Amino acid sequence: MSKIIKRKYGAVILLDALGASGFSDTQIKEFLSARSEINEIIKDLSTNMKGWGKFHSPNIYTFGDTIVITFVLRTKKYIPEHIKGIVILMRRYLFHSMENGILFRGSFSFGHFIEDPKTNTVMGKALSDAASWYELSDWMGLNSTPSSNSVLEYYFNHAPQFINDAKWIHPYDVPLKTGKTINLYSISWPAAFFDPYWLKDKKKDNPSKWFLEILKDLPVPKGTESKYENMKKYFEFIEDKIANNQIQPTAESGG
């Protein structure tokens, strides 16, 4: 008897690794190892969030150099808190990935989807929405889809400061391949470099130098120059806000 697969509501994140198509065999092995380690870190960290109104751990699907992460949002009462948890986890995901030399670019959407972890399958409107946007940006980063802007603004209508906080998630003119920009919500991965906990844990005293230390060892394939320049501009945007005391770095717990 076949299993009945129910439709779910939640967040779907779609990411792809920049430059992975040109990886050597050695780089592929390093990528797979680092990706597996990062996935386990996020699953373990999400387990510690169970007290956040029955926060559900994500399911993580891998398809070559593409990753799909799903979060189920079941109880409307807790959706704002759960979205905060998703933002925390995804900022950590991008940060740890960069530490391991993996630059992800992608988008996230809210909506209905169907998934079956046993067959590594995800389908539905939320995935289609994320899929239609994740390759359009011209940088390293994770942003909302246009339709998800309204979802965030609806759930945080009572507390708009969270989705306007440049150390977590905030509106940003995301650069597109067309040369234009579009105002979407961006996960603030640069803020993690200024996080007091991580600076102490990694024995770093200069966030900008730490960021450039990682970049200097990464190849820049011809044709991808703008992605790296736009990534640096975004880092400098967050750095400037911190330098001018417009946002205060927040210390995360380890994990």
Image (spheres, rainbow, N blue to C red):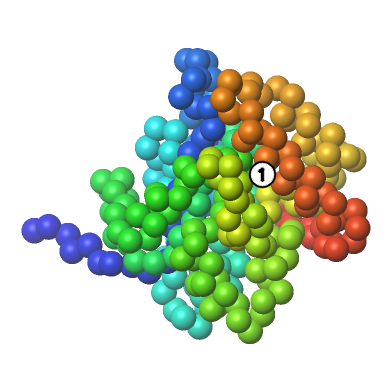
Q: Residue at x 50, y 72 (%)?
A: 151
Quadrant where the N terminus is found in the figure: bottom left
From the viewer's perspective, tell me whether residue 78 is left or right of residue 120: right
Above or below: residue 95 compared with residue 11: above
Q: Is residue 214 above or below residue 15?
A: above
Count residues near mark 1 (Cα–Cα under 10 Å), then give few for <14, some for 14-19, many for 20+: many
Q: Residue at x 48, y 39 (%)?
A: 16
Can you see residue 132? yes
Image location of residue 128, percent across then percent down: 35, 54
Name the element at disc 1: helix
Q: Does residue 162 sit above or below 31 in this rendering?
A: below
Viewer can see residue 187? no
Left or right? Give the position of 121 relative to 151: left
* Residue 78 image offset from top left, x and y in percent: 52, 78
The x and y percentages for residue 31 are: 52, 28
Q: Is residue 5 left or right of residue 12?
A: left
Percent position of residue 144, x then y: 53, 58
**Which picture quadrant has residue 217?**
top right
Residue in the foreground of this view, choosing between 105 and 93: 105
Q: Residue furthest left?
A: 1
Give the residue pinned by disc 1: 95
Left or right: residue 129 compared with residue 215: left
Q: Is 84 above or below relative to 67?
A: below
| Residue sitting at the far top | 25
For badge 1, the amino acid type reads Phe
Q: What residue is rendered at 90% in x and 53% in y? A: 243
User: What residue is shown at x 68% (from left), y 54% (from top)?
Assistant: 188
